[in-house]
Image (cartoon, grey):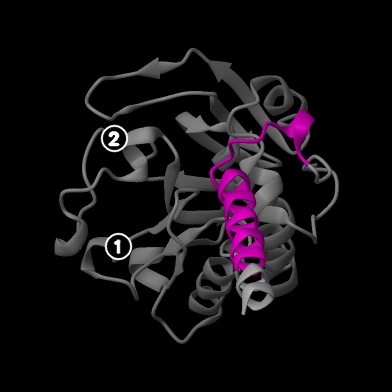
Amino acid sequence: MRRGGRNVLRVILILLLLLAGFGVLWFGLVPQRYSPFASISLDDPPHWFVDFRLAALRRDPEQCRATLQPPHIVATPIADKVQPNGCGWTNAVRIAKIGTADIGLEQLTCEAAAALALWMEYGVQPLAVEMFGSPVTWVQDMGTYSCRNIIGNERWIATRSQHSLANAVDIGAFRLANGKQMSVKSDYRADTPEGRFLREAHRRACYYFRVAIGPEFNKAHHDHLHLDRGVLVRCK
């Protein structure tokens, strides 16, 4: 019995250590220089431990600057702004372009910016060329930073949105080099090439973002895709 009890305690201890290790990586508590995983790169599509490698950027501004480089993204670091009401941002950037696509984002965390660049580079752009023979040249930003709680879900109405930390971005539409434009509001649910493009782009965002929700989630998201790198995991 004593040996059996010790074995049980040993198993519990190992599980607790594994859980703790998962937690520190999940919450980005381990900067890249101490991470057991290779640093994320925009030069190649990442295949292994993508989430942990993105999370390692959260508290590592130096690695952030080294990662967010042209031609994949045009990003400028901005000063931290932390407010006592649970809003504000740290280690964030201003974004002018994602690859060949114009977009204007005033505040977005480095972690979310890297996820956005990877999604565009290896998810959206190949899809646009495959389906329409033309790359995306413009992306409609419908909001990044906003000091507010979650909307559209009564269970979370008292909880700060990831927008309040500049850790989320809402995407409303895309324009291609050939002039074709498609929006989540008008085309997402349609049984058309444009609708299929938007739904597949949404699905591919789940690989880089922890939350990727759109019109199928609730009415509050009828006209945009909400993408964030928060704590929860949801793709719908």
Q: Is residue 47 visible?
A: yes
- Amino acid of disc 1: His
Q: Does 173 sit left or right of 40 as displayed?
A: left
**Distance CA(mark 2)–CA(mark 1):** 16 Å
Q: Is residue 80 above or below residue 75?
A: above
In the depicted view, which residue is nearer to us: 186 or 148?
A: 148
Work out whether mark 2 precedes mark 1 in sequence or the reverse, and give the earlier one.
Answer: 2
In the depicted view, which residue is nearer to us: 86 or 126?
A: 86
Q: Please, what secondary structure does the residue beneath circle 1 have? A: helix
Where does the image place residue 91, in percent across and percent down from the top left? 54, 24
Where does the image place residue 152, in percent across and percent down from the top left? 19, 61
Label 2 packing within 10 angstroms: few (<14), some (14-19), many (20+) = some
| Quadrant of the drawing holding the N terminus | bottom right
Rendered residue at 52%/55% (across/down): 174
Where does the image place residue 233, in percent across and percent down from the top left? 47, 63
In the depicted view, which residue is nearer to us: 7 or 196?
A: 7
Majority secondary structure of magenta residues? helix
Where does the image place residue 229, in percent across and percent down from the top left? 50, 48
Q: Is residue 135 visible?
A: no
Q: Is residue 221 above or below residue 76?
A: below
Q: Is residue 3 above or below residue 172?
A: below
Residue 43, label in figure: none
The magenta-colored residue range is: 9-35
**Location of mark 2 (residue):** 146
- Amino acid of disc 2: Ser
Q: Is residue 13 magenta?
A: yes
| Quarter where residue 22 is shown | bottom right
Label 1 packing within 10 angstroms: few (<14), some (14-19), many (20+) = some
| Quarter where residue 55 is shown | top right
**Location of mark 1 (residue):** 221
Q: Is residue 55 magenta?
A: no
